[in-house]
Structure formats: C-alpha cells, structure tokens
Image (tube, rainbow, N blue to C red):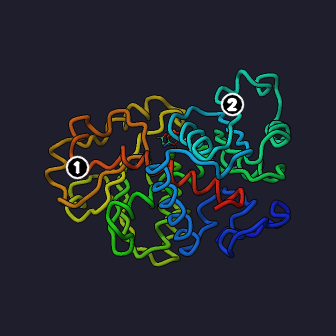
Amino acid sequence: MIHPNSEKNPHLPFGDQQNALFYGKDILSVNQFDRNGLEYIFGVAHEMREMVSRVGSFDLLKGKILANLFYEPSTRTSSSFIAAMERLGGSVISINEVQYSSVSKGESLPDTIRTLECYADVIVLRHPETGASSLAAQYAKKPVINAGDGVGEHPTQALLDLYTILEELGKVDGVTVTLLGDLKYGRTVHSLARLLSLFGVRINYVSPGILKMPSEVIETLEAQNIEQMEFETLDEVLPSTDVLYVTRVQKERFDDIDAYESVKSAYVITPDTMKAARDDMILMHPLPRVGEISREVDDDPRAAYFRQMEYGLYVRMALLAMVLGKA
Ligand code: ASP
Ligand code: CP
C-alpha cells in the first residue's frame, strides 16, 4: 500500500479502491508497497503488455505531461519512462543533461521541481544524492517518482525486477535469490532485497568484503525472518540458486580508485558458470553491464536481462497510469 499523501490526491475522477491508493502519490521507496499493492501494479502491467502487443500505443494519458529530470546518466530508466508516457498518448519534457538546464546556473533542486510542476503532471527524478526524491516530493504538489537516488533506492527497478521473476518463474514465494557484486553501493539491490522480503524467499549475498550489503538492509530483513547468508564466492550457492542477480561495481561511488580496481573484476559470469547453474535458473542484471556477464552467455535461454528491460516498460506504463488516476 502506498502511504497516504492526501495533499496530492485532491479528488478522484473515477476508479476503484486500489486506484485510490496510488492516484496522486509519490513513488519514493519500496517500503511503500505491500503484496496487495504489488498484485495490483503487476495486473495493470500485464494489461499494458497486452495492449502494447495489440495496438502499440493508446490514448489513456492523452493531454498529460511527464517531466523526466535526470541529474545522472541513464539509458533504460529515462527512455523507458519516455516510451511509457508516449505509448499512453502523453507527452514528455526531457531534461537528461542538467548541465544545459538552469541547474548549471546554480538553481536548486526545490526550485527546479517547482518550475517543472508548473508545466507537467508528474515528475520522474534521478539524482546522485540519497533522499533527493523525498526532498523533491516535499516541495512538489505533483507526484514525484524516484528513478534512483544515489546509493539509496531505485524502486521502479525493483518493481520491474520482481515482475521479471514472476513472469519468468511463475512465483516468488519459495525462491532462492542470489545477489552478486556491488551490494554496498548498488541501489537496485537495496530496493530489491527489501521488496523480496514481502515474500517467503531465501537470499544469498555474494560480494567482496568491501562491498557487502549494508547492515540496515540485513537487519530490516532479519526482523522479517528472511533467511539471509553472506559469501565471498559464488560456487557454494550457485547450485541452489533460482535467481542469480548480478550487479556492476559502481565505479562512480568510489572515492579511492585503487579500491575500485581491486574489486572491479571480482566476478564474471561465463558459459562455465551457467554449466554449474540449474537448468531452470534465471540470470538477471539491472544493466548496464561492464564485464560482469560475458557476452557468450547472452544466447543462453536463462539469460533474462534483455527481457527484464522490456518488462520495465510495462511496469512503468502501469505506474504512470496509476499515479495519474487512469489505471
Ligand atoms: N542502472 C542501475 C542504476 O542506475 C544499475 C547500474 O547503474 O549499475 O542503479
Ligand atoms: N537499470 C537502469 O537503471 O539503467 P539506466 O541506468 O540505464 O537507467
């Protein structure tokens, strides 16, 4: 369930109870969701997928405008939100290069948000500082969607990751998920671990010693009785893994380049890794990859990372329709 934020939800034009839970709401953290809310989002995402395959685009959000504001690089999140809005008949103000906006003249985040909401109905924000989306949401009267806030969270990625697991494996309960790579700075795994804790999963964390999952995340999941184990090598856990979720070492978050160099090639998934994995395992990655998964693995049917990107389009279409009260 999304936490109520009645100021941004003045009146409902139409819709059912679930629609009311999302209409006008910010999407800032995965902590906002429960299983019912997820079921609803994934149901809408499924409908979006059917509609895209049948008609490509349709006019559900005709007349609505999205401001897509990115202070950090992005290919997938930025373009999938643009595609989502356009496939729903809406339009987009795209600020992907903040250096060409008034941000480079020194304009603050609150003022930038106040500006964009004069023109748009919903704001998608990626920013290098943890908590930036929450700050933006305090100033915005329009819904703000967190598209990644520093090392904090990437909630829409976690939603599409969970949707991928459901579509590929048909269930989440009972699944063993192994999160591999940069668990310290990777915001996608911070969000995904928290979201997975709503289900009966086992989670393995495999990382170099200096890139372990933050203790706050582990303690939160411990309190929810989630079975979690930490490792430095993959071998031991690979045979029992249903979902192998690989991440990039987040070079841009390191102060010490030597420390980055010492861990950047810690894990590489190759055809040999896949031989040791289960036949029904899926291999995921939020992307971009920079060497953690060898290209020779791409044709393995268990490599789900390209399908994962496509699922993101449907989940983001669902989220836009829901926060704008049209799901
Ligand atoms: N694209 C994801 C993110 O922005 C993962 C990554 O960059 O490694 O968090
Ligand atoms: N997965 C992801 O967030 O990709 P981008 O950084 O390209 O948006």
How many numbered discs, if any?
2
Of 94 and 84, the residue lying toward us: 84
Rendered location of residue 118, percent (x, y): 85, 41
Q: Is residue 74 left or right of residue 119?
A: left
Horizontal relation, residue 131 to residue 150: left or right: right
Q: Which residue is nearer to you in this view: 114 or 197?
A: 114
Which residue has dot 2 on it? 95
Q: Quadrant of the C terminus?
A: bottom right
> Mark 1: few, some, or many residues within 10 Å (few <14, many ≥20)?
few
Residue 26 vs residue 78: left or right? Answer: right
Task: Identify the residue at image location x=58%, y=71%.
Answer: 37
Q: Nearer the viewer, residue 48 or 261?
A: 48
Q: Quadrant of residue 126?
A: top right
Q: Residue at x 54, y 68 (%)?
A: 38
The image position of residue 301, as x and y in percent, is 23, 49
How many residues crowd mark 2 within 10 Å: few (<14), some (14–19), many (20+)? some
Q: Which residue is at the front of the view, 177 or 113?
A: 113
Q: Is residue 208 visible?
A: no
Residue occupied by mark 1: 301
- What x and y, as percent, mark residue 148? 60, 46
Q: Amino acid at mark 1?
A: Pro
Disc 2 residue type (three-letter):
Ile
Whether the residue under disc 1 has CB within 8 Å of ligand 2? no
Quadrant for the N terminus in the image: bottom right
Question: Please, what secondary structure does the residue beneath circle 1 have?
Answer: loop
Q: CA distance from mark 1 to mark 2?
A: 36 Å
Label located before the other in sequence (1 or 2):
2
Residue 239 appears in the picture as rendered: yes
Q: Label 2's element?
A: strand
Q: Residue 190: x, y in percent?
A: 52, 56
